[in-house]
DNA sequence: CCCTGCATCTCGACC
DNA sequence: GGTCGAGGTGCAGGG
């Protein structure tokens, strides 16, 4: 990795056109040739960048550019598209290269998939007598997170979210519309299950006759551990 | 901005829990206290980070940590949530601080806005005889991208996307529902226009009687250039 | 301030 | 390789 602090102007053309006026910024060149242009604020997103696969070429400025104070022109060309990033370097304040090696990578825990797995195992959270039909029940517009039957044998479609928001209710509504066309399943009831359900999402769900269930992730995980220990 | 190259392990807890094993990485500390942990690959997204507003405290390692080779413990606490990032620094390879100042910011020329402008100018792409009523036609739930009339004088509502996906069809459906309540406009036909339309979005659109139009951005832009040259 | 919609989204899973 | 859904999404614009 090479890290350069430099005053520069930057131009990107590709999906859109974007321009950064002259200012001092951090330029990061990664081992795969990708380039990131960071300012001293904002979030983790760079002001501008080029994703791999791409090629960085450092060239001389034209006469005009040199006259304007440019000392180096970096051209970063994407390998597969015509996306191009041009960095005109005016003054280099610092320039360091270091060998980092391959990163062992991030270990994550706590996603929607885990919630789905736990709820499938603990399906009676939806109510006594509920039985799992299957996870990822396929429909024409995509899989329903969980399909189950309640104590009376009626079909129940469950949409699971970490955070229950309006678009999740919309999604479940589409599934219900389709599932209810299937005479073998209809009538299908909807359950919107999430760790937290936003007020507006709850209002919309209730308005559409969809039940809301708040999932306690820690409790479900704890129960999972207990069950694991039994076997 | 402070840039540190160091071997470190990182733990994040908040929306999820994540862990990075010991390896050499780049640590970027921005003026607002936000911290980015970058490896020598991937895209512009850091392996781990803390967004502002947040506070960085550099502390001493515990005895156990010191025994394991930790020389500094960085704790980055988010100001509003309980998100926390802990960086255990083992060896500092490089450490530079530099004053960047406020960045003048990015100047963009976007896509969807441009597509909308081009389609409004070239409204007959929708079919011969179409005429523009107006762009950003206001409704109670937000503006419709384009309202037009076809060769027979019937109203047409157009939703424009760069990539046509299901939520875009949902959006247009809501507009159509509202517009069709207006006796001066009804019946209103829907057109879903995008540079590319995902298969599932197309299925849903067709199912709801909404026409799909694929827009050729380059051709439309080219035509725009030609027209510009004529005047 | 929250909500909505877009993004050079990125990223992973699955077909 | 594509397709699709999720994201610690970030971000801007509008009420």
Image (cartoon, coloured by chain):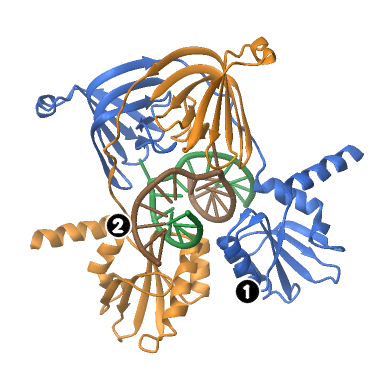
Chain colours: A blue, B orange, C green, D brown
Q: Which residue is mark 1?
A: A207
- In the rendered view, tell whether residue B138 sits above or below residue A81: below
On what subunit does the disc labeled 1 rest? A
Label at residue B217: 2
- Seen as rendered, the residue at the extreme right is A230
Does residue A93 appear to the left or right of A98 in the view shown? left
Q: Residue at 28% x, 83% y: name it.
A: B151
Residue nearer the viewer, B4 or B119:
B4
* Residue A7 image offset from top left, x and y in percent: 25, 26
The quarter of the displayed image where residue A218 is located: top right
Q: Residue at 44% x, 36% y: name it.
A: A44
The quarter of the displayed image where residue B66 is located: top right
* Residue A206 image offset from top left, x and y in percent: 65, 71
- In the rendered view, tell whether residue B171 sits above or below residue B177: above
- In the rendered view, tell whether residue B113 sits above or below residue B154: above
Query: In which quadrant is the N terminus of chain B drawn?
Result: top left
* Residue B138 image offset from top left, x and y in percent: 35, 73
User: Disc 1 or disc 2, which is closer to the eye?
Assistant: 1
């Amino acid at each position: 990795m090479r890290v350069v602090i430099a005053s520069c102007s930057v131009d990107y053309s590709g999906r859109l056109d974007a321009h950064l006026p002259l200012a001092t910024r951090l330029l990061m060149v990664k081992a795969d040739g990708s380039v990131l242009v960071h300012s001293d604020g904002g979030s983790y997103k760079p002001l501008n960048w080029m994703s791999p696969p791409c090629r960085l070429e450092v060239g001389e400025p034209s006469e005009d550019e040199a006259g304007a104070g440019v000392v180096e022109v970096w051209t970063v060309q994407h390998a597969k598209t015509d996306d191009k990033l041009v960095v005109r370097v005016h003054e280099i304040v610092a320039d360091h290269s270091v060998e980092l090696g391959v990163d062992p990578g991030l270990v994550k825990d706590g996603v929607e998939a885990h919630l789905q797995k736990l709820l499938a195992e603990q399906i009676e959270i939806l109510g006594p007598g509920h039985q799992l039909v299957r996870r990822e029940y396929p429909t024409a517009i995509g899989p329903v997170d969980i399909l189950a039957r309640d104590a009376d044998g009626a079909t129940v479609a469950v949409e699971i979210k970490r955070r229950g928001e309006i678009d999740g209710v919309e999604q479940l509504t589409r599934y219900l519309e389709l599932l209810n066309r299937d005479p073998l399943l209809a009538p299908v009831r909807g359950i919107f299950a999430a760790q937290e359900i936003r007020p507006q999402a709850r209002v919309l769900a209730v308005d559409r006759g969809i039940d809301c269930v708040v999932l306690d992730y820690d409790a479900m995980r704890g129960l999972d551990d207990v069950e694991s220990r039994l076997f």
